[in-house]
Image (cartoon, rainbow, N blue to C red):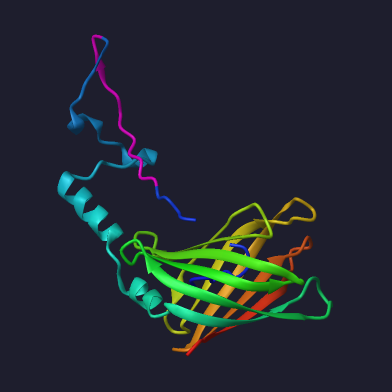
Amino acid sequence: MKRIALIFSAATLLLFACNSDKKTEEGKMDDKISETKMDESKGKMEMPDSATMMKNWQDYMTPGDMHKMMASWDGTWNEDITMWMEPGAPETKSTSIAENKMIMNGLYQESTHTGEMMGMPFTGRSTVGFDNHEKQFVSTWIDNMGSGMMVMKGPWDEASKSMNIKGKMVDPVSKGETAVRETFKVIDDNTQEMEMFITMPDGSEFKTMKIVFTRKK
């Protein structure tokens, strides 16, 4: 995952907001937190105590097993890219190089991709992180062939050593938004595979890209 996006590809901010009931007396705000507990039957939540808040935050910011797995992907990778521009169209081939490194205390993997695409110099950058609270991966992608940013999310399947992430991207031709899905699979310590699918207007999926990553020795 790191680049699990050699496609299009920010860092996600999880905003934790707590709603509190406001109680006034003679035009003044009652600052008693104990009076701000929410009625769960109305879809609201209680504010956790300070010890729980600190533990939750610590859990959120501490790298875990998924981050250690990402760290094992650090290094230089050759990328063998196959693309299809539309259903039934002939495939096109290209290659690029990915440089992966963990950043920010081992919470994210940043990947820089350089190569050629459609006869033009290509540069892309992705970040991949595992959200400890959401229990899923978050991938972002940007490149020099577009002015947008793509964000995708999805869980890890340990049995198949793969992930299935989903998001949306801007179609630069129609200027519309397109649903995108990617699968990323670890074949072995030195080989990985990514496939990208876009949703067509009729709702069907079309595989538009496949990348085989081989660790450079």
In the picture as drawn, the residue positioned furthest to the left comes out as 51
In the picture as drawn, the residue positioned furthest to the front comes out as 121
Of the pair 187 and 120, the residue shown nearer to us: 120
Please give the name of the residue rendered at 76% of the width and 64% of the height, measured from the top-left corner.
200
Please give the name of the residue rendered at 43% of the width and 79% of the height, measured from the top-left corner.
73
Task: Determine the image quadrant of residue 19.
Answer: top left
User: In the figure, is residue 161 to the left or right of 8?
Assistant: left
Residue 166 at what x, y percent from top left? 57, 64
Q: What stretch is highlighted in magenta?
A: 15-26
Above or below residue 123? Residue 147 is above
Above or below residue 148? Residue 188 is below
Of the pair 17 and 185, the residue shown nearer to us: 185
Residue 9 at what x, y percent from top left? 58, 62
Q: Is 21 covered by the magenta stretch?
A: yes
Task: Determine the image quadrant of residue 106.
Answer: bottom left
Residue 36 at what x, y percent from top left? 25, 31
Task: Determine the image quadrant of residue 95.
Answer: bottom right
In the picture as drawn, the residue positioned furthest to the top comes out as 26
Q: Is 160 covered by the magenta stretch?
A: no
- What secondary structure is the magenta-colored segment mainly? loop
Above or below residue 207? Residue 153 is above
Residue 189 at what x, y percent from top left? 44, 89
Please give the name of the residue rendered at 18% of the width and 27% of the height, measured from the top-left corner.
32
**How many numbered markers are drawn?**
0
